[in-house]
Image (cartoon, rainbow, N blue to C red):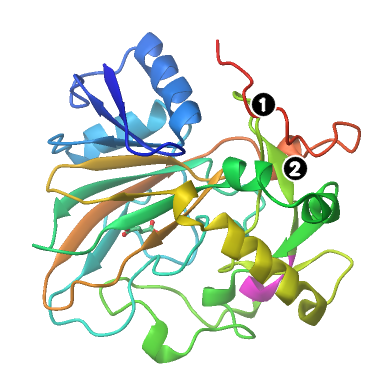
Amino acid sequence: MEEHRLTGTIGAEITGIDLRQPISDDLAEELRHTLARHQVLFFRNQHLSLDQLKALTRAFGPLMRLPYVQPLAGEPEVIRVLKEADEPGGVFGGDWHTDFSFLEQPPAGSILSAEVVPTHGGDTVWVNQAVAWETLPEPLQQLLAGRDAIHVGKPYGVKWAPPAKERAGASIKMTRGDPEADSERAHPAVIRHPLTGRAAAFLNPLYVTRLDGLTEAESRPILDQIQRHATRPEFSCRFRWSAGALAIWDNLFTQHYAVNDYQGHRRLMYRTTFAGPAPRELALSPTSGTGARRGSASLS
Ligand code: SIN
């Protein structure tokens, strides 16, 4: 297995591995540590069946069933991320986000397997939330450390429902307009990675409405400033998909963004998610400082 870094801060393409073969415990362990180091791993020409995709997912953690998005028929743990060539409007994941961060236990990671890719466009971009945290101005670190942020399932609820023209198209069936999705969920605004020890801001604009102790109006300029910093190109990598390619990402320590620039072309991916510790279990303890200097903790 060889690692080829995509950028100086996030992402590595892995070669010399066939993920269609059974994954031993040792390999699963190596993959988990490699993911923790790079936050997103990319593999080309894998062409996994759904059973192989689920087996790979289980190497990282238990498969999850997610609410609101209708899964593939007969495959409750698989979402088909599809946009047809003639489908207008937004795309699934077309805003900066961390998958389902409003759940009590959001996915620890997600896997996307490319089946049909457009001739151009349709890339996905990820940002490293640990580097973003480590380089955040200290007053903002102090504001976030030990504080909760409030997450809400905005796209699926009533109060913050997106305008129709911005929604993902008809190919992805979602339950919308559920008042229950507007319930507030508090998660620590800063979490520490269980394998690397690195701290990261756990915030994203799709689901976070405010910081605990502040109103939405007070939180907005602060969250916007943090988000501008968190999505700097220096903290990002961008993947050009090919059929059979696969991305595995650490969901809690990254944000990602599906680029909607391939109108007139079909794009079909299969996505699974795996469970891990709840953000509360990863909270930066009030006595451990801002964590800004713990970024180089080594992996075993
Ligand atoms: C997602 O947000 O999981 C979808 C990403 C993509 O389709 O590129």
Asked whether residue 281 is in view, the answer is: yes
Q: Nearer the viewer, residue 298 or 283?
A: 298
Q: Judging from the image, what secondary structure is the residue with disc 2 in?
A: helix
In the image, which residues are magenta?
A: 180-184
Q: How many marks?
A: 2
Percent position of residue 91, x then y: 33, 72
Q: Is 115 displayed left or right of 213 in the figure?
A: left
Mark 1 lies on residue:
197
Q: First in sequence, mark 1 or 2: give its number.
A: 1
Q: Judging from the image, what secondary structure is the residue with disc 1 in?
A: loop
Mark 2 lies on residue:
280
Percent position of residue 180, x then y: 65, 73
Percent position of residue 90, x then y: 34, 78
Name the front one of labels 1 and 2: 1
Q: Amino acid at mark 2?
A: Arg
Residue 19 lies within the magenta run = no
As drawn, 256 above or below 3: below
Q: For the view shown, which residue lies furthest in the left direction? A: 119
